[in-house]
Image (cartoon, rainbow, N blue to C red):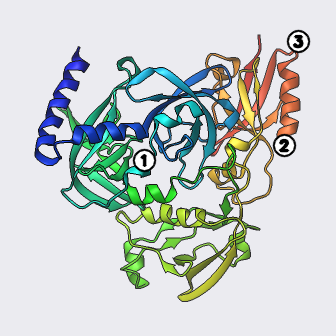
Amino acid sequence: MRFVYSFVVAVLMSSALVAQNFPENIDVTFNERTRCCVEVTGFAQFEVDRQPLHAHGIVIDNEGRIVMTEANIPGWLPPDQLKDFKVCLLGDSDVEFKATYLGQDYLTSWHYIQVEKAAWDKLVPVNTFGSSTIKIADPVWGIGVLPKPYGYQPFFLSGNVASTQKMPFDMGFGQSAIGEVGTPVFDADGKLVGVGGQPIRHERFLFMGADTYLVGVQRAAGTTERFLQAEPFLRYHKRVPAKPTGIPQPFLGVAGLQALDVEAARFYGLQDQSAIVVSDVIAGTPADKGGLKAKDIIVEMDGQPLPKFRPNDIVRQYAEIQIAEHQPGDTLSLTVFRDNQRLQLECVLGQVPKLMKEAERVYLPRLGFSIREFLIQDALNRRIVTLEPQPGVVVQFVRPNSPSSSVGLQMNDWIREVDGDPVEDYAEAVTMLEKIDQDPSKKECVLLVRRGNETKVLQIKLD
């Protein structure tokens, strides 16, 4: 009852805004626009259980393709472990349409599905309604969606644009909640102006007796005042992967990029733009072959100066996007400062090494954990700047209350030895650990693992 009361109050408040800022036929426009938005459910299959998935989806074409713009789906999980996707129309949770998972785009991290043909004529692509840009104080509105027990009923959210910002994509901010994460946002004429993004985290003081705490507060119900503007959404929204595992990604081969601080930028005469300092260059990669070196300062990519951002650190994400917009085999032109000299470098991009979603893995039920291959990203996370294969394997999952969890084995532990024998690679680790796991006479297993800067010996007792 408390929820229903709060919802009624929200609707009444929205109605006042309708009368003030929106046309009289906004209810008709609202009902039309709800056909470009759907509810998506599915399951993520893990080692010992399956967890439900839920996301808002936006229809992008007449063949039932749908994009989900936020990370409600584990991007590291192999696609064959993402199962049973279904689509519901807003206002009708009783009818479900089957959907096929199409994959995740590496540039945007958005996920795509395609709903069965029976639903196509019930949906309208979001670009049918046109798009427009926004400015400060413009009235905007979006679609909220009640939970499944309430039939996925859509409701109206509205506000005025409080601010716009490049982060590095063009973002908009309402002075109040104007949508939900992953639902479309429109202007007063019903044209698309954006898609709801993650809510802003606000800092608040919490007073408890004589003590004061600074805490972060974020909306919990899914509504948001932040939205990705229409231009970048429409620029990238049809990057549908050709297969569920994705498509080849470009790879430069640098690690630890850092934004050049303000004082250093002033020294180099870069007050009106951003710049990036290269921490490490991986040997044998396109960056290394192209002549890029650690401590180089990148000031241009493909002949374009790096734009100025606030906060300054956003330039790192901008640079990653510029690289991601290329294809393996493309030449990336870099302008760098090195030893007070301005140099032009040409790097032929390679292909990203194996990703976590592509890594081989196996679950060991008696031991109670799973392992996967040691990847280049694991090496970089441990400050090992090389493409050379590393010995050992990584713990992917530890079952609660299992023999391994009872001795403190943790996800991302790096297994280096099993019963005193070094682990050279994934295949050897599987052979060694499966032999232990399947041998009922084996009563213990000793693992040597690396965790951060520590080496630990864990003695697992088997029943």
Q: CA distance from mark 3 to mark 2?
A: 26 Å
Give the foreground label among 2 and 1. 1
Q: Is residue 241 left or right of residue 212?
A: right
SS at circle 2: loop
Give the foreground label among 3 and 2. 2
Residue identifier under label 3: 441
Residue identifier under label 2: 425
Q: Is residue 232 left or right of residue 441?
A: left
Circle 3 residues within 10 Å: few <14, some 14–19, many ≥20: few
Sequence order check, earlier mark of 3 and 2: 2
Q: Which mark is residue 126?
A: 1
User: 270 and 3: which one is in front?
Assistant: 3
Residue in view at x 85 percent, y 43 percent: 424
User: With respect to residue 305, does 52 lie above or below?
Assistant: above
- Which residue appears farthest toward the bottom when viewing the image? 341
The quadrant in which the C terminus is found is top right
Q: Which mark is residue 88?
A: none
SS at circle 3: loop
Circle 1 residues within 10 Å: few <14, some 14–19, many ≥20: many
Q: Where does the image place residue 171, in percent across and percent down from the top left?
A: 35, 56
User: 136 and 59: which one is in front?
Assistant: 59
Q: Where does the image place residue 314, in percent across and percent down from the top left?
A: 43, 62
Q: Amino acid at mark 1?
A: Val
Q: Where does the image place residue 12, in percent across and percent down from the top left?
A: 14, 30
